[in-house]
Amino acid sequence: MKIFFVIAVFISLATESLFTAAQDTMSRGSQGMATAAAVLQARRTFIFLDFTENTWVHRPEDVNTRFVSGGFNANLMYEIFIVKNVFTFAPGISYSNVTVKNNADVVYVPDQGNDRGYTQLMPIPEGRDYRVSKISTSYFDIPLEFHIRIKPEMRGRNLWLAPGFRAGWMIGNFWKYDGDGAGGYNVKYKVYRIENLENFHYGVSVRAGYYKFGLYAYYSLTDLFEQDKGTELRPFSVGLTLTPF
């Protein structure tokens, strides 16, 4: 339900932005602002939806990730034409959720020399039965992209490439475990506000596709945990991207 709510909010924002942009364009036309129109030849607000498979790179050898570890980005972009219909700059806002299934317990290790201790991912011992162990993080992001269209045509049926950068702030996180606990009994729980996660993150992204469909990849330039306060892991995501509007 949370994802559907996010999509509904983005569609509402996109509709409002399109209406406002249309009114602004009519007003500028009536006032004869030819100079501004020459600098910013056109503007367009649109949505990218990304469906991702997530993992960690640069991780310890005994910490493994599992397939399928799904994620989701909802991006509202504001496109500014630099070369009309060919080359554009697109800033925006985004909600992203990244879930990574793995084979580890999240263990907080107090340290008298560190006010916040150390958060370690410790591999689940062999012989302990478990169904899921996963870490989920959610972010509010600011994506910045350059859009390059190859042989553009009026209906938008063309190849396109979109290298970019995104940065954002963590707005939620949890660790979920479902499996054997102490004494061999089955337990299921969520731990919210995992200690020592890096709240601010940033990284590079790229999209490439045809018309409304494409591929997406993101490589984080920050680790999942704060430096020297958690297991060294770096998020990486690949997936499909859709532009429904």
Image (cartoon, rainbow, N blue to C red):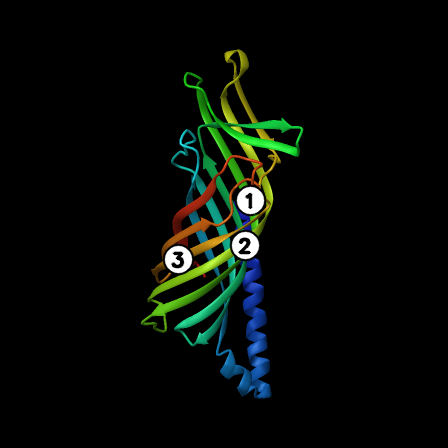
**Residue nearest the viewer, comparing 16 with 143:** 143
Q: At which x and y percent is residue 35? A: 54, 86
Q: What's the residue type where badge 2 is placed? A: Ala
**Which residue is denoted by mark 1 in the rendering?**
138
| Crowd class of label 1 (few under 14; some 14 to 19; many from 20; radius 10 Å) | many
**Which residue is denoted by mark 3 in the rendering?**
207
| Crowd class of label 2 (few under 14; some 14 to 19; many from 20; radius 10 Å) | some
Residue 225: give its label: none
- Tell me: residue 164, above or below residue 138: below
Q: Disc 1 to disc 2, how far (Cα)? A: 13 Å
Residue lying at 54% horizontally and 54% vertically, measured from the top left? 167
Along the horizontal axis of the image, is 183 left or right of 148?
A: right
Q: What's the residue type where badge 1 is placed? A: Ser
- Of the numbered discs 2 and 3, the one sitting upstream in the chain is 2
What is the residue that sits farthest to the front in this orientation?
113
Q: At which x and y percent is residue 50? A: 44, 51
Q: Disc 3 to disc 1, how far (Cα)? A: 21 Å
Q: At which x and y percent is residue 174? A: 57, 35
Find residue 241 and report its image quarter.
bottom left
**Which residue is denoted by mark 2 in the rendering?**
167
Residue lying at 44% horizontally and 17% vertically, measured from the top left? 128
Element marked by disc 1: strand
Q: Disc 2 to disc 3, how far (Cα)? A: 16 Å
Specify whether residue 1 is in view. Answer: no
